[in-house]
């Protein structure tokens, strides 16, 4: 599949990592299968969307077969290319779903235009936390991942943020009542529950 020119330039310039400590753009050399553009996640997410579409669980405003997941957020939303027209990737638009909800947001522009517009405060995505830009947005490259430090994320559909917040408060973490849950808290929650399961 051809990729948009702006994405190839972005991936080359920045490499794998996160923007504003919240937005993860998948990369062909992502450090784990969960953030690798060429890994299994885009197909897994598309299959889940197709299942939701077929069952009427959450309305999908586009054909799931036209959506290609190329990023995610700390709260479990996914960023998609709307791959239409399929032979003109530089004209693809951006869609963002709502984790555990029916809302979708569409941006009429490229991924790079979307990131710039969101990170400079011009575009407000309703699914994103209101405090997203409280700190100056920056890019954080992905560090080396080892089996000891990497905890696979739970599927978005099964992770309830209120449950994570309740667990975090009970275990001494300071978390906001609303908005995003810091990545280190989510990772601690996942580690604790993996240990309980094992």
Image (tube, rainbow, N blue to C red):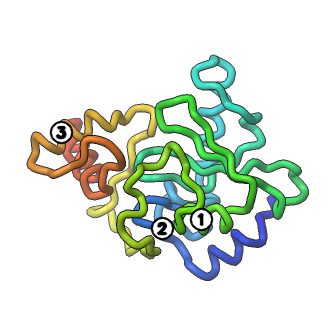
Whether residue 169 sits left or right of residue 124 in the image: it is left
What whole-number distance in Å separates the C-alpha atoms at marks 2 and 3? 26 Å
What whole-number distance in Å separates the C-alpha atoms at marks 1 and 2? 8 Å
Q: Give the labeled residue for mark 3.
A: 167
Which residue is rendered at x = 52% and y = 59% of the image? 35
Element type at mark 2: strand
**Up-down relation of residue 158 to residue 129 (above or below):** above
Q: Which label belongs to residue 19? A: 2
**Up-down relation of residue 168 to residue 26 (above or below):** above
**Up-down relation of residue 32 to residue 40 (above or below):** below
Image location of residue 144, percent across then percent down: 38, 74
Element type at mark 1: helix
* Residue 195 figure quarter: top left
Q: Which label belongs to residue 115? A: 1
Choose the circle earlier in sequence order: 1 or 3: 1
Residue 108 versus residue 31: which sits nearer the camera? 108
**Up-down relation of residue 175 to residue 36 (above or below):** above
Image location of residue 68, percent across then percent down: 69, 49
Element type at mark 3: helix
Residue 103 versus residue 2: which sits nearer the camera? 103
């Amino acid at each position: 599949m051809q990729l948009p020119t702006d994405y190839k330039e972005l991936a080359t310039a920045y490499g794998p990592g996160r923007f504003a400590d919240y937005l993860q753009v998948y990369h062909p050399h992502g450090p784990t299968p969960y953030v690798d553009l060429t890994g299994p996640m885009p197909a897994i997410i598309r299959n889940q969307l197709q299942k939701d579409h077929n069952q009427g669980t959450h309305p999908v405003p586009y054909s799931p077969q036209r959506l290609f997941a190329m990023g995610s957020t700390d709260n479990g939303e996914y960023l998609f290319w709307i791959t239409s027209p399929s032979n003109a990737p530089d004209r693809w638009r951006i869609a963002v779903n709502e984790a555990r909800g029916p809302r979708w947001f569409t941006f009429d522009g490229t991924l790079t235009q979307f990131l710039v517009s969101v990170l400079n405060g011009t575009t407000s995505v309703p699914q994103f936390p209101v405090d997203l830009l409280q700190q100056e947005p920056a890019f954080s490259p992905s560090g080396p991942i080892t089996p000891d430090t990497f905890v696979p994320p739970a599927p978005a559909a099964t992770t309830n943020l209120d449950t994570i917040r309740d667990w975090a408060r009970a275990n001494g973490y300071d978390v906001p009542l609303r908005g995003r849950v810091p990545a280190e808290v989510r990772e601690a929650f996942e580690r604790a529950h993996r240990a309980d399961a094992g």
